Image (spheres, rainbow, N blue to C red):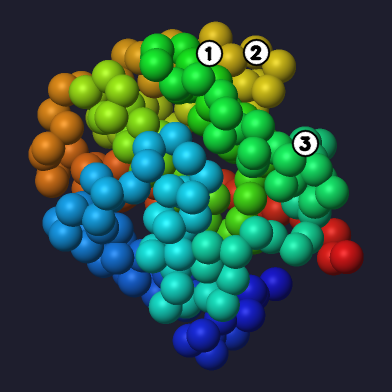
């Protein structure tokens, strides 16, 4: 299945290539223009702005809440009927310590507010919180793909693994363009596995 897109692309491989090219360019603009630093770290409104900027040239739903229920494997993300309440609760979660920030990240992953592009935008959002609260960011090149995916899969019931994976990769290179782009590049490396089931309402 190919998502309806503004580019008129009907081949999934072509869409994936264009999506990567455009959203990487837009992600770099977010960093270089200083737009990221103007967002309120840890708020859903910040994630919404990130998602919209990354994907607005590609999808009509950029920055908009999904209108389908999503699942991956046997895991169901937050049902639509509870999605807005979930996001309001996430906004209120504390974020002053490393553990609190990762717990907030895990909850946002469970919410999965957008139809596509959640992982890529939420990892930028996570680094924004780390930067604002701890003066750290994640060096995503030090995060093993399999360790990360398994830890995220288990995180709704056991978050100690994802905390360990991310803590080991923290760096204080918060103004480094190279460090930021490592995260963007690795986002596509992590995203390659994703297969979602959707349930239209």
Residue at x-position 22% and y-position 62%? 29
Q: CA distance from mark 3 to mark 1?
A: 18 Å
Q: Do callouts 2 and 1 mark residues in contact (Cβ within 8 Å)?
A: yes
Query: Residue extending furthest right?
Result: 201
Q: Which percent across, then down, holds residue 99? A: 46, 12
Helix, strand or loop at mark 2 = loop
Q: On the image, numbered disc 2 is attached to which residue?
A: 158
Helix, strand or loop at mark 3 = strand
Depicted 182 relative to depicted 92: above or below: below
Depicted 29 relative to depicted 69: above or below: below
Q: CA distance from mark 2 to mark 3?
A: 14 Å
Residue 11 seen in the current view: no
Residue at x-position 59% and y-position 71%? 61
- Chain-order first, disc 3 or disc 1: 3
Q: On the image, numbered disc 1 is attached to which residue?
A: 161
Residue at x-position 60% and y-position 64%? 64
Q: Which percent across, then down, holds residue 19? A: 43, 69
Classify the position of the N terminus by image quarter.
Answer: bottom right
Q: On the image, numbered disc 3 is attached to which residue?
A: 75
Helix, strand or loop at mark 1 = helix
Residue 167 seen in the current view: yes
């Amino acid at each position: 299945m190919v998502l309806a897109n503004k580019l008129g692309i009907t081949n999934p491989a072509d869409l994936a290539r264009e999506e990567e090219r455009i959203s990487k360019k837009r992600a770099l603009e977010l960093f270089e223009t200083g737009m990221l630093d103007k967002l309120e770290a840890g708020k859903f409104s910040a994630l919404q702005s990130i998602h919209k900027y990354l994907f607005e040239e590609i999808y009509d739903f950029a920055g908009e809440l999904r209108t389908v229920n999503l699942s991956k494997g046997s895991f169901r993300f937050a049902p639509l009927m509870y999605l807005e309440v979930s996001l309001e609760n996430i906004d209120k979660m504390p974020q002053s310590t490393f553990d609190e920030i990762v717990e907030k990240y895990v909850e946002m992953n469970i919410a999965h507010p957008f139809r596509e592009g959640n992982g890529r935008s939420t990892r930028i959002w996570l680094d924004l919180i780390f930067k604002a609260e701890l003066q750290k960011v994640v060096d995503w090149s030090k995060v093993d793909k399999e360790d990360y995916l398994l830890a995220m899969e288990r995180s709704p019931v056991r978050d100690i693994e994802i905390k360990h994976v991310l803590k080991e990769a923290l760096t204080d290179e918060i103004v480094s363009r190279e460090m930021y782009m490592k995260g963007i590049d690795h986002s596509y490396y992590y995203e390659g596995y994703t297969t979602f089931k959707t349930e239209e309402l």
